[in-house]
Amino acid sequence: MPAVNLKRVPVVLYGMVFLIVLLGIVQQVFVDTIGIETPLKDLRHISLDEELNLGAWFSSMVMVCIAGLTAVIGIIERHSKKPQNWPYWMVLAFGFLYMSVDENIAIHEVTIDPLRNAFDLSGAFYFAWVLPAVVLVGTLGLVYLRFLIRLPQRFAVLFVVSGSVYLAGAIGFEMLGAMFAGSEGYDALGYKIFYILEETFELIGLTTFLSALLAYLGEIHQYAAITFQRTIQAGYVKAGE
């Protein structure tokens, strides 16, 4: 029976993260030392600071997988003996589905100029989309406290850690990089360092959360593998089967 062992997936994912970050650093060194007047131009497709690149594609795919897994867990728990958390799982599913779309078409960037101009934002808020993002994250954090309390402690910690790492990149390092972008421009060394850290933390946070979800599915709901076969039995296989 062809199957993917869920325990092995995180190893592959972290390997891909390492490769993407390494290629992004190589791209920046290449541009800084050789320039863009070559047949390879600026190697945009492996840059960590561009849209429509390898890192954005990987992040989007991980977000889609997270959306799928949280939806599956929500459906399973809705029909379990403890269904209290299933609405939270489904909200996560829709949220990550939206995030995967935004990662590809950058919906949040549409808000930057209007907010920056309306509130005369600069410094850490030069990329003005972080302002409503901070409010949203704070609100969701309060709403999801009950969800986290109901979880087994190990997974509550894993979810909080992975979310904190992701937000440190998506918002924290974004704000630090914005300080250099607004005052010194996008060629400033500080901006380059912080956008590399931003993307690295985002990728690690997403991968850690996806890995934690796979572990949750395996340990809490006893699903050990995903099968691929042309029968009505295709799908998840429970441990011991």
Image (cartoon, grey):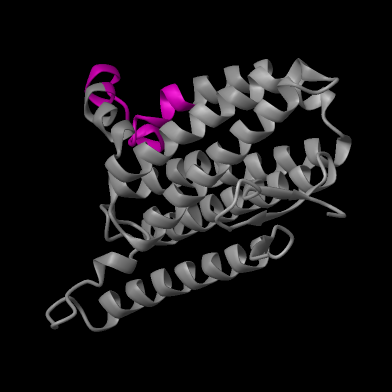
Image coordinates for residue 175, horizontal then vertical, percent: 44, 40
Q: Can residue 8 be seen by looking at this rendering?
A: yes
**Left or right for 125, reference 218:** left
Task: Identify whether 140 is placed above or below 222.
Answer: above
Task: Identify whether 231 is placed above or below 127.
Answer: below
Q: Can residue 144 be seen by looking at this rendering?
A: no
**Left or right for 90, reference 239:** left
The quadrant in which the C terminus is found is bottom right
- 184 or 34: nearer the viewer: 34
Image coordinates for residue 205, horizontal then vertical, percent: 60, 49
Residue 127 located within the stretch drawn in magenta: yes
- Overall secondary structure of the magenta stretch? helix
Segment tinted magenta in the rendering: 115-133
Task: Identify whether 183 is placed above or below 225.
Answer: above
**Left or right for 146, reference 124:** right
**Left or right for 228, reference 110:** right
Image coordinates for residue 148, horizontal then vertical, percent: 77, 27
| Residue in the picture at 72% in, 47% down | 212
| Residue in the picture at 65% in, 18% down | 87
Residue 74 located within the stretch drawn in magenta: no
Image coordinates for residue 21, horizontal then vertical, percent: 47, 67
| Residue in the picture at 64% in, 66% down | 2
Q: Quadrant of residue 108?
A: top left
| Residue in the picture at 38% in, 53% down | 56
